[in-house]
Image (cartoon, rainbow, N blue to C red):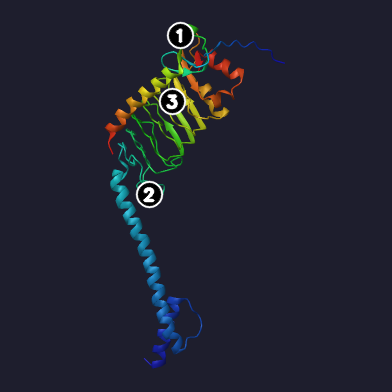
Amino acid sequence: MALTDKLTAIADAIRDKSGITDLLTLDNMVTNVADVYDTGYLEGHVSGYEAGKKSQYDEFWDSFQDGGRRTNYNGAFRGTNPRIDGGWTDTTFKPKYPMCPTDSGSMFYYSNITDIENTAIDFSNSTSFGYMFQGSLVKFIGVMDVTSCTELLYTFFAGYSIQRIKKMIVNENNVFTHTFRYCNVLSEIEFEGDIGNDINFAFSPLTLESARSIINALYNYSGTDITHTLTLSTTTKALLSDGDRATITQKGWTLA
Amino acid sequence: MITESINLIKLTASDGYVLTNGEAYSKEVYLGCNDKAENWREITEAEYQEVLKKEEEAFDVYDNSLGN
């Protein structure tokens, strides 16, 4: 092979790796070899880094979620009391598999996660929701189907940051034991199904729309001798019309 | 035009008192159709605060049992 052919081959190889289309002098080739190396290193580093990150992500979540088979999520994303920074946050809370917990107790207890509204969690098989959000920084919650659980024991208790619960799917058997106590900034909640036992939102500045969703879900005890109590905050009660109050009381519920 | 007669029975606690039926507490209540005024009684604000304090203590016991 003639020397010029060899130089042309080297120049072609450099152009192939660098994307340059210009004619290359020998000086250009010296400079561009270094550039080809740097580009290759950077691209390889980045793709290698991303591949490594994905591999670590898969390895962790495959183990943590048992390949998607995990159902006991008791305390799974909890933090510590008193709170410290770090741990489970919106950055680290990136579950690989949809979650279908049968035990959701303390799941986000003192967690630093703020938003689970769009996280794929199907609660419909969960029989435990005790202390689930106590002390957490969670602000937005998605759909919570609690129909498989009887007692919602302190579920949102001390959920000081909770602003919105997109939807609660309930049935008349659910018992609300201090469920919403100290939900001091909860303003939006929608109910689907039947509320059949005393329920207390004394700490929550619910919107009128939310209050009416609750009123609509109250089980109708008229024609029976059963009475239950709906407790609302002073703020929310002031929004109700006489018609709202009449609907509540005619369904056999005392408004406190 | 719609004319409605809405019958509401409202109980209001005296100054310095809170109404309770033993489970719920409020300064004023609108009685449900199956409820009666005699199911509600007045307690003082101090008694109400005592109730809250006992509830908090009961909760603290459980919270401490959860561990960190």
Q: What kind of residue is marked 1?
A: Asn
Q: Are marks 3 and 2 in contact (CB under 8 Å)?
A: no
The residue pinned by badge 1 equals B39
Relative to A164, does residue A65 appear above or below in the rendering? Answer: below
Q: Position of residue B39 (x, y in %)?
A: 45, 8
Discs 3 and 2 lie in a common subunit = yes
The residue pinned by badge 3 equals A170
Relative to A212, does residue A50 appear above or below in the rendering? Answer: below
Q: Is mark 3 on a helix, strand or loop?
A: strand
Q: What kind of residue is marked 2?
A: Thr
Q: Which of A93 and A13 is in front in this view?
A: A93
Tell which subunit mark 3 falls on.
Answer: A
Q: Is mark 2 on a helix, strand or loop?
A: loop
Q: How far apart are marks 3 and 2 (CA)?
A: 31 Å
Tell which subunit mark 2 falls on.
Answer: A
Q: Can residue A5 be seen in this view?
A: yes
For residue A92, the mark is 2
Q: How far apart are marks 3 and 1 (CA)?
A: 28 Å
Q: Where is residue A25 in the image (x, y as percent from the top left)?
A: 47, 88
In the image, is A222 to the left or to the right of A49?
right
Q: Quadrant of the N terminus of chain A?
A: bottom left
Residue at x 49%, y 27% (from the top left corner): A191
Q: Is mark 1 on a helix, strand or loop?
A: helix
Q: Could you say which quadrant of the image residue A53 lies in? A: bottom left
Q: Where is residue B59 in the image (x, y as percent from the top left)?
A: 34, 27
Q: Do the residues labelled 3 and 1 touch (CB within 8 Å)?
A: no
Pointer 1 local density, CA inside 10 Å: few below 14, some 14–19, many at least 20:
few
Q: Distance between the residues labelled 1 and 2?
A: 51 Å
Q: Where is residue A24 in the image (x, y as percent from the top left)?
A: 47, 86
Q: Which of A65 and A188 is in front in this view?
A: A188
In the image, is A61 to the left or to the right of A144?
left
